[in-house]
Amino acid sequence: MKGILFFSILVFSGSVLASDKFTCEYATADISASSKLNLIIKGSASVVFDGRSFTAYRPDGTYVITPPLTEKKDGMLFLDDKTKIFAASLDKSNFAVSDRIKKTTEQWAKCEDVTPIDNKPSVDIQTKNWKYRSLGKAEIFAIESAVKEQLKDPESARFKHSKYVSNGKGAYCGLVNSKNSYGGYAGNTPFMVMLINNGKPHAGFIGMGGDDVETMSTLSVCRENGYF
């Protein structure tokens, strides 16, 4: 897996990191019994933010990947998908995820930018001529088939698709949530495929998140190609 991911970085990316990294104070709260938010601080944790979506790590090493935050209000970027609310302050000092089903809130607060200066993203990426379009049914089938071949439980896969970015590279990225070896859902995981459409769509698998290195590598390359 790592070999595939590192190869994809060389092919599709001009740099490895395209996001800011923060060290934050991590806290959680149970919102099921009271309207008052009683946050319990549980330690330090990292957040990686590209200005549109973020990957927030917990002290135990698990993480949550948010979809693009498309709404803006009261100094916050946010997205409400009816089951969860994802939010990030415009000054990048606070991030939060509230789960309506689990009745919990997670907060990454008092964040400090720890991105190395040499790794700050370049602003000269040529995106003006990129075009976005919706996927066709045959393309979705080809993409999901290629990704399912890599999963432990392909029938459990739940996909979140984005629009295809026509940038001359053929790469496509999305998110997949599937069951792991323990029978539980692993959470939204980024994936990348090569989409070829010469009348009959075909997708070749490139890489997928797994451990921290694989996830960050996949996210970085996808974001540089216009996704997430």
Image (cartoon, rainbow, N blue to C red):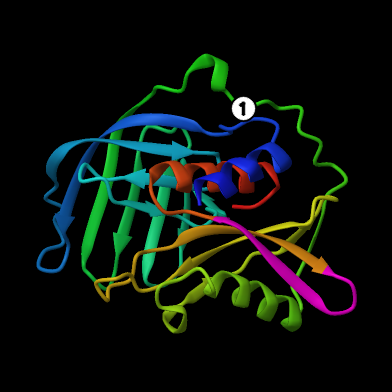
* 51 left or right, relative to 29: right
Establish if 115 lies above or below 98: above
Q: Is residue 154 left or right of residue 35?
A: right
Q: Position of residue 225 (x, y in %)?
A: 70, 46
Please tell me which residue is depicted at 44% across the width and 38% down the height of the picture: 48
Judged from this view, the residue extending furthest toward the front is: 3
Residue at which label 1 appears: 121
Element carrying mark 1: loop
Would you say the magenta stretch is mainly helix, strand or loop? strand
Give how far across and how far down residue 136 sits, in percent: 76, 78
Report the front residue among 83 and 148. 148
- Residue placed farthest to the top in the image? 117
For image coordinates 84% across by 79% down, the residue present is 200
Q: 10 Å neighbourhood of mark 1: few (<14), some, or many (≥20)? A: some
Q: Nearer the viewer, residue 76 or 103?
A: 103
Amino acid under disc 1: Pro
Residue 132 drawn in magenta: no
Q: Is residue 102 above or below residue 16?
A: below
Residue 126 in view? yes
Count numbered badges in the picture.
1
On screen, residue 228 versus residue 166, left or right, reads: left
User: What span is colored magenta in the figure?
Assistant: 197-207
Q: Please state if 142 lies on the left or on the right of 46 as rendered.
A: right
Q: Nearer the viewer, residue 223 or 30?
A: 223
Q: Residue at x 89, y 72 (%)?
A: 198
- Residue 74 in view in this figure: no
Q: Nearer the viewer, residue 25 or 222?
A: 222
Q: Is residue 161 above or below residue 2?
A: below
Residue 50: x and y in percent read 54, 39
At 69% from the left and 48% from the top, the residue drawn is 226
Compared with 6, 141 (above or below) is below
Report x, y in % for residue 108: 29, 40
